[in-house]
C-alpha cells in the first residue's frame, strides 16, 4: 500500500514537472560562452532537491496514513473484543439465571410432592380412624 501511494505521488509529481510550460526559445546568438551550461546545473540540483523533498513528504504522508489505519484497526479490534466479552458475560449470566430457576423449580416441586404425601398420609390416617370407629361401633 505504501509503495502504491509513493508511486502515485511520484507519478503525479513527474506529470506536473513535465507539464510545465517551457521558456520560449531565444534566437540563436553567434558565440555563447559556456556560462549558461553552468547555470543550468543548479536548476537540475534544485529539481533533484524538490524531488527528494516531495518523496520524503510522500513517504511521511504514507507513514501517517498507515499509522492511522493501524490505529483504526486496533480500535476496531478492541471494540470487537469488548463486544465479545460483553456477549460472553451476558450468556454466562443467562446460564446462571436459568440454572437458578431450575433449582428453584425443583425445590418447589419437591416441596409440593412432600405436601401431597403428607396430605395423603393424613387422609389415610383419617380413613383408618373412621374404620376403627365403625368397627368399635359394631361390637
Image (cartoon, rainbow, N blue to C red):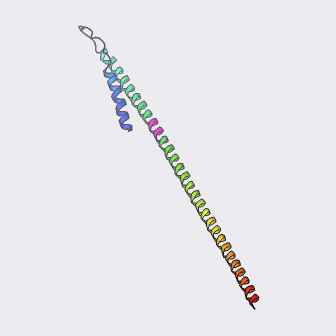
The range drawn in magenta is 63-71
- Which sits in the foreground, 128 or 80? 128
Magenta-drawn stretch contains 121: no
Q: Residue at 57% of width from left, 60% of height from top?
A: 95
Choose top left, top right, bottom left or bottom right for residue 29.
top left
Q: Residue furthest front?
A: 138
Q: Quadrant of residue 24?
A: top left
Q: Identify the residue shown where x is 44% and y is 38%.
A: 66
Residue 67 x, y percent position in the rendering: 47, 39
Q: Position of residue 98 (x, y in %)?
A: 58, 61
| 110 on left or right of 16 | right
Outermost residue toward the bottom in this view: 139
Residue at point 33% right, 29% down?
Answer: 11
Q: Which image quadrant: the N terminus? A: top left
Is residue 43 rendered to the left or right of residue 111? left
Indicate the position of residue 69 as horizontal and vertical percent values: 46, 39
Magenta segment, prevailing SS (helix, strand or loop): helix
Front residue of 31/121: it is 121
Q: Eyeballing the image, is 57 above or below 37?
A: below
The residue depicted at 32 percent of the width and 24 percent of the height is 15
Q: Is residue 55 left or right of residue 103?
A: left
State whether residue 52 is above or below residue 119. above
Image position of 98 with respect to 31: above or below? below
Q: Foreground residue, 121 or 66?
A: 121
For the C terminus, the image quarter is bottom right
User: Residue 63 appears at what percent x and percent y?
Assistant: 44, 37
The residue nearer to you, when weighing 68 against 6, is: 68
Count of residue discs: 0
As displayed, is residue 77 above or below residue 14? below
Amino acid at each position: 500500500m505504501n509503495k502504491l501511494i509513493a508511486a502515485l505521488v511520484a507519478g503525479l509529481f513527474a506529470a506536473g514537472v513535465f507539464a510545465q510550460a517551457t521558456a520560449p526559445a531565444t534566437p540563436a546568438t553567434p558565440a555563447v560562452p559556456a556560462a549558461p551550461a553552468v547555470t543550468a546545473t543548479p536548476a537540475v540540483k534544485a529539481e533533484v532537491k524538490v524531488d527528494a523533498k516531495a518523496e520524503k513528504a510522500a513517504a511521511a504522508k504514507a507513514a501517517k496514513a498507515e499509522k492511522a489505519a493501524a490505529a483504526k484497526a486496533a480500535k476496531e479490534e478492541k471494540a470487537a473484543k469488548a463486544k465479545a466479552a460483553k456477549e460472553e458475560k451476558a450468556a454466562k449470566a443467562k446460564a446462571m439465571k436459568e440454572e437458578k430457576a431450575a433449582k428453584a423449580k425443583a425445590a418447589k416441586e419437591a416441596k409440593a410432592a412432600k405436601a401431597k404425601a403428607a396430605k395423603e398420609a393424613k387422609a389415610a390416617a383419617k380413613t383408618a380412624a373412621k374404620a376403627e370407629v365403625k368397627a368399635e361401633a359394631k361390637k
